[in-house]
Amino acid sequence: MRCLVTGASGFLGSHLTRALMQRGHRVTVLLRTTSHTEMMQDCLQSARIVYGDLQNLLALQSALASEPVEAVFHLAWQGVTAEYRNNPQQLTSNVKGTLDLWECAHATGCTTWIGLGSQAEYGPQNGILREDTPTHPKTSYGVAKLCVGQLTQQLCAVGSMRYAWLRLLSAYGPGDDERHMIPSVTRALLAGSRPSVTAGEQMWDYIYVDDAVAALCSVLESSASGVFNLGSGTAIRLRTVIEHLRDYIDPALEIGFGEVPYAADQVMHLEADISRLRAATGWDPKVSLPDGLRRTVEWHKMKGKNAGSR
């Protein structure tokens, strides 16, 4: 199938682009000229590269007019890290840019729209998230994701396109943003430092990147439509996650549990009910958390060796 991937140079997007091509799909990627492509270097020769972004789709319109795609994976998003969660551009750039992208795809005959949502659409929750859990986003990021998801759902309904929206919890693995908890703690431990963290009593749902990508591919390759939660389906204590990382690196290293206080709005239990996605696609997570963390640590070790040999 001919697919377009936005956000292809990012963490999840780079893994998705590679997986789609390995499955025999033809992939077009929309990249900024300033995009860092280290995570997708092996894909650049095989993918069709179109330069632009959600605010400049002229080149994409031309490319899709000459060679249309059948499915869009929309992962590109401005402002995904904590410091941008309430930036006005969440609404002004992402919403309009996505609607322009949808119009471009629809006008050139695309029949399937697969968008990446977020658990932030639900707002602060403590417990298991189901697709019918009420949505009360508390950040501009969550509001924008919810808005985009609902608008594109309606557009697809009137435009006769298959629609799927996957609300992702916490994905991790090789290439994850270094500001996130797992990579930041891993790098500190590999450097022999003593990371300061919370008491780690939070129960959190982490999904390995390969499993998240397999879920997206399974949606493409099935008739699944609608809103789905995407996670591992299992919550594990954050302290246990950090201890696994420590033990894979050096069990003698110290961790400063409790040295960082909980935030006033700290969520203590976040877990996805993934039964709807399972039923619609037959997908199931394959990588256990211990195995995924081990793979992640090994990737960071190899990255450090490669950097040291330059």
Image (tube, helix red, strand yellow):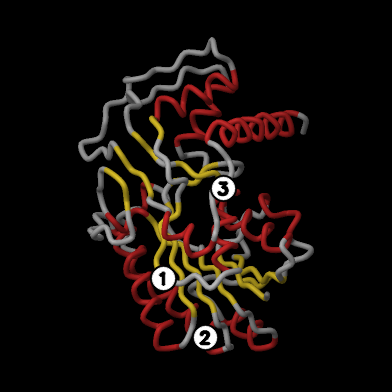
- Residue at 28% across / 36% down in the picture? 268
Residue labelled with disc 1: 226
Q: Earlier in the sequence, mark 2 or mark 3?
A: 2
Residue labelled with disc 3: 209
Between disc 1 and disc 3, the foreground one is: 1
Q: Which mark is residue 106?
A: 2
> Crowdedness of circle 1 by 10 Å Cα count: few (<14), some, many (20+)?
some
Q: Earlier in the sequence, mark 2 or mark 1?
A: 2
Amino acid found under the numbered disc labelled 3: Val
| 82 sits to left or right of 217 | left
Q: Which mark is residue 22?
A: none
| 25 sits to left or right of 216 | right
Q: Position of residue 236 (x, y in %)?
A: 41, 33
Against 51, residue 273 (above or below) is above
Amino acid found under the numbered disc labelled 2: His
Q: Nearer the viewer, residue 223 or 202?
A: 223
